[in-house]
Amino acid sequence: MISRRTAITGAALMALALAVPALADDLNLPREWVELVAPPFVHPHEQATKQGPKIMEFRLVVEEKEMVIDDDGTKLRAMTFNGSIPAPMMVVHLGDYVEVTLVNPATNTMPHNIDFHAATGGLGGGDLTLINPGEQTVLRFKATRPGVYIYHCIPGGEMIPWHIASGMSGAMMVLPRDGLSDGDGKPLHYDRIYYIGEQDMYVPRDKDGKFKTYDSHADAFADTMEVMRRLIPTHVVFEGRAGALTGKNAMTAKVGETVLFVHSQADRGSNVHIIGGHGDYVWETGKFNNPPKKDLETWYVRGGSASAALYKFLEPGIYAYVNHNMIEAVELGATAHIKVDGAWDNDLMAQVRAPGPIEEPVAEGSSIPPAASTAVSEAAKSPVQAAKTSAPVTPEFFHIFQ
Ligand SMILES: [Cu+2]
């Protein structure tokens, strides 16, 4: 298996030797330097643009380091672009040129490179960007297909799955120049955007079942590969750590705001679901030349891809954003929260009756005893009171999803 994979990469490198791409000519286009930000946030960008194509400049610095991935202090020998898991999201427009400077500082121990799924040719740039510690390289490619795409390290052989599972993936969004649309010509806009990168992780345990720590990446390699080959993750997390987007780190929004959620998974598929919410418009495969699906409850993010989902929040509260494989959500870490402020809409949901003792139905055709009718209207007030104070309602599921 491993030698075959290596052979695949080797064959690609050999083919490349026969067709070496020329060094880039200068393009007579304006340049824009983009300062990347750590997920779940995304750098400022225009949704639709009247400007012509540009050269969009980005810088990614590889960091090999140890990172804590849960509240128990479990440590991963992580590898990252720009220090975060997932790597930062980049946004460009169709027809722009993406120019990425990839830096591998001398303090690192391994070669790294980058494969952009949005790019065409040369292993997505992997063949042109493999650099040793102490080197840097610059890759340019044209963004020719609109959509959300992942990018990841692809250094060859079993280094590929190891580097990816250690954190080396991120996302790029190529927006249509006139912005998103519903597929029937209606423009779609978002008030906020969040990028959620999901990653399965495989931390070795000692003979007592405790997670092991290692002095170096090299020390961790053999044990980690052994756990990875069994395909049973010890962690499935958003933003590199269980709880990275919960509690005080929850994503935020307001009632009436439309939020674009970009979700990537470089390895395994994921079943994205917002508990109590929906996807109004979902590009499940992430490609904007396909019309979005409407009113989805859950959408599938294929391993090695990203999806984009647009949702307008209609009720306040704490929403759980999960991988709806609930084993992965609750036991392995794939849960985030979205704290939504605003007024409660009693028409969309109300508690008709607060929990109480079971009573025998007395009135024919009704399960509610007439004597309880006053209690019913009293109970129904609780969401209304929340609306009056504009305090965020905390639905029951939030307590369930601690
Ligand atoms: Cu790498």
Image (tube, rainbow, N blue to C red):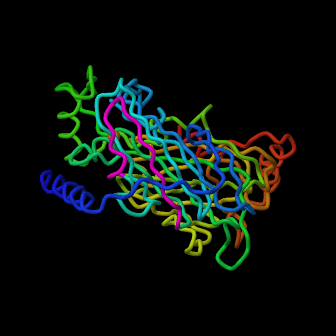
Report the side of 357 relative to 214 (left or right): right
Callout count: 0
Q: Nearer the viewer, residue 228 or 13?
A: 13
* Boundaries of the magenta span: 126-144
Residue at the image point whose x is 62% and y is 43% from the top: 34
Q: Which residue in the rendered view is the most extreme toward the bottom? A: 184
Quadrant holding the N terminus: bottom left
Q: In what quadrant does ligand 1 lie? A: top left
Q: Nearer the viewer, residue 258 or 177?
A: 177
Percent x, y of residue 327: 39, 48
Q: Splitting the image into 4 quarters, where does residue 79 fall?
A: top left
Percent x, y of residue 159: 25, 43
Q: Nearer the viewer, residue 213 or 106?
A: 106
Compared with 210, 14 (above or below) is below
Compared with 73, 367 (above or below) is below
Q: Which residue in the rendered view is the most extreme toward the right? A: 388
* 44 drawn magenta: no
Q: Is residue 313 visible?
A: no
Residue at the image point whose x is 64% and y is 49% from the top: 31
Residue at the image point whose x is 74% and y is 41% from the top: 392
* 140 drawn magenta: yes
Percent x, y of residue 81: 44, 38
